Image: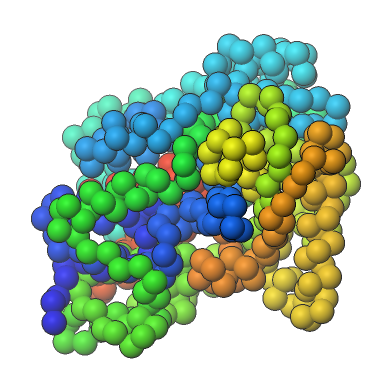
Amino acid sequence: MQVYDYIVIGAGYGGLIAADLLCQQSKSVLVLEAHSELGGCASNFYRSAKGFSFDVGATTISGFDEPKSFGKALNKLGLKRQAQKYLKKLDIGMKVYYKDEIINRYSDPELWLAENNRVFADEKIINLWRWIFKIEKQAWQALDMNEALMPNDFFGFMKMIFNKNFFTNFQHLNLMPLLFSSFQKTLADFNVTNSDFVNFVDQQLLITAQNSYKQTPTLSAVMGLNYPQEVYYPLGSINQIANLIADDMLKHNGKLLTRTKVENIEKNNGLYSVYDNQGALYRAKALVANLPIWSLEKILNINSAKKKISNITQEFNNAWGAFTVYFAFKARLNLQTNYLQIHANKEISNCKTHLEHNGSIFVTLSEDNDRSPSGWTSVTISTHTHAQQWFDFSAENYKEQKQKTQDEILELLFTTIPELRNCEKTAFMSGTPKTFYKYTNRENGFVGGIKHDINKPIIFMPQQKFSSQEDIFLVGDTSFPGQGIAAVSYSALSFAQKQ
């Protein structure tokens, strides 16, 4: 039986990038993926005989412009130019429907400042955005110089500090306090009190940081609030680049097995034994888990490592779930973007996220003649929900509440964009955290990773090598704060840098 240098469990973007980087270091690598499609939650699925394709969730492509991590990873793999053909950069990263306003999130900084001036008419907000632009650029420069930002132990931490960029890093010391102060304090420091702007910010941060402005560390908030400045629409499907990375990995002698769900991990005679749902055994010297920490805990049966990961999951014992709605419509809309955020005018059933306001929905619209037959548009709508409630409902109540939540979300969309109410529509579906658990194997249906939280800043996040006794590594959205392809790409770069 072949013994691999590494087995990578999960073919999300973090796992695929890590696997290809290892293969290019001449390591023998096997990737095991439970599903037929690659990309994890940043994937798509097909429904109906007409051939509609839907994004699984509210995932956008950002971090492609270097020195940001997704573009940097693709450049290291020699794939950036090939990946470019699958992407369309948007001049308007998203439209935000708030009360009676339509706020265009322009990619051009000056246009975005002018839009803020039009909507909020507050010079203090303009000054805040100029500061955000500066700090976000600096943060990406710091990450670019410090790929191994997530050290495995004290010696790794010292190596990170005393690296070749030791003196250059001093210019980034001003970022450190921003890890330990909330964005609420930053708003106060800039004397920003406009309640409409605060609500706008709060809903943006729920998408990117998975938390409210009161709890989100300022540095996380800065990077999350400015991400719509660089948004790409993925042509064909969101997992096109995942397939490109996988193909490159195979060219470098990596191996990939889909429809192979890992159900048990043991250690025998110094090697890791990985068993799939058919009882097949695979062996390796080291493991890379592109799994949420809660899912890894369930399948890991190595006593010392089990205890360590259990301690982590107890400390980070909660995350958001998603309620998603899918359908297709036949109509022409001139929205100038593929992404919408719509603030709810009343609370959506089963989707309470804030005490102060009613939450929002995030809408993904396919490009014309892309992912659907001519004249049709595929739609994915996502909003936050508390995951556990969907597992507690009785079967009858689950069905009833699912339909009720779907109807309210669609009513919000049709009220906001009246052209959709009476046009031809088809392929209605919806998903809950139970659905995500079934189809993505994410424990409890948690999505979006660990919340950015001022009480648990980055230095206290789960370490990639969470057990000093074992060669088991974490990549993906619970190993680096921040959901999205940019964050999981950084987790893969950080892991590969330390091998």
Residue 29 against residue 308 in the figure, above or below: above
Horizontal and vertical percent for residue 159? 22, 47
Percent x, y for residue 483? 51, 49
- Residue 228 pos. (x, y %): 56, 31
Q: What scheme was used to colour the molecule?
A: rainbow
Q: What is the total number of numbered labels drawn onto the structure image?
A: 0
- Judged left or right of residue 141, residue 177 is right
Please tell me which residue lies in front, 450 or 396.
396
Res 34 → quadrant: bottom left
User: On the rendered image, what quadrant is the C terminus found in?
Assistant: bottom left
Residue that protrudes farthest toward the right in the picture: 346
Q: Residue at x 59, y 47 (%)?
A: 58
Q: Residue at x 78, y 57 (%)?
A: 406
Image coordinates for residue 396, horizontal then vertical, percent: 82, 79
Quadrant assignment, res 376? top right
Can residue 312 be seen here?
A: no
Q: Horizontal placement of 266 versus 37: left or right?
A: left
Task: Specify whether 36 is left or right of 131.
Answer: left
- Residue 116 against residue 424 in the figure, above or below: above
Residue 465 can be seen in this image: yes
- x 26%, y 38%: residue: 79
Q: Is residue 367 above or below residue 249?
A: above
Screen quadrant of the N terminus: bottom left
- The residue shown at (60%, 24%) is 92
